[in-house]
Image (spheres, grey):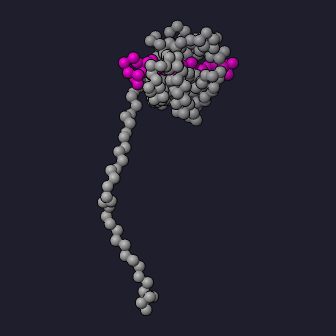
Amino acid sequence: MAIRSKDDCEGDIGELFPDLLEAVNKGNHAYWDMAEGYEDRLSASFRARGKFDLTVSELRSALDGRPGISIRLKNGSTDFHIKGKWLMKFHKFDEADSIALNTTQSSLDFNENVVEQLTLGEMPEETVIFLGYKDSIADRFAPDIQLTCPDGDEPAWVIELGKGSAPPPAIEITPAPEGPDTSPATKIVPRVDKRKFGH
């Protein structure tokens, strides 16, 4: 088990926090844009999966090619390896800052921060961290966005990245009214061929 401290995380990847917050926010906006008009017809599992897929796409766009970061797709899951120290995954949190666990051994290992088995010994010193959100009942555009370090039944620590925010208002472009051309007139002087007049 390789659990690093909250201070280590803030010191190692703190410069990424604004990008992580923005990516989760964009993923949330993209989901609600897609779901507009269908909110009452969509199940909770569809909503969670939609937000997951759209947010992971935003995270890949934000982090791909950054120094010290590699992105791996494994068994349908996207892993973000950061500076050889952190293995970040995206999840939805419950009120206890925990994630819904699958019954697979891999899921249990992630929650216990046992990385040796998960990476086949390639990256035994990485610490697992979960980037995720907690939905806000009052405002769908303001989820709590945070990083947690799993350690069994309760997280070892939590870093609050901030709240989501509403998308910027759409800008309406009003076409210019049709009417007479009021631009200054250009005087056109015909060219005179002086050769016709013996010059």
Q: Nearer the viewer, residue 97 or 181?
A: 181
Q: Is residue 60 visible?
A: yes
Q: Determine whether 137 is above or below 194 in the image.
A: above
Q: Residue at x 32, y 50 (%)?
A: 177
Closer to us: 57 or 79: 57
Q: Image quadrant for the C terminus?
A: bottom left
Give the residue furthest to the front: 179
Quarter of the image that includes the N terminus: top right
The magenta-colored residue range is 119-144
Q: Is residue 6 visible?
A: no
Q: Position of residue 19 (x, y in %)?
A: 48, 31
The residue positioned 53% from the left and 12% from the top of the image is: 100
Residue 20 left/right relative to 171: right
| Residue furthest out toward the top | 153
Q: Is residue 20 above or below residue 136?
A: below
- Among the 4 quarters of the image, the one containing residue 88: top right
Query: In the rendered view, would you say 180 is above or below 2?
Result: below
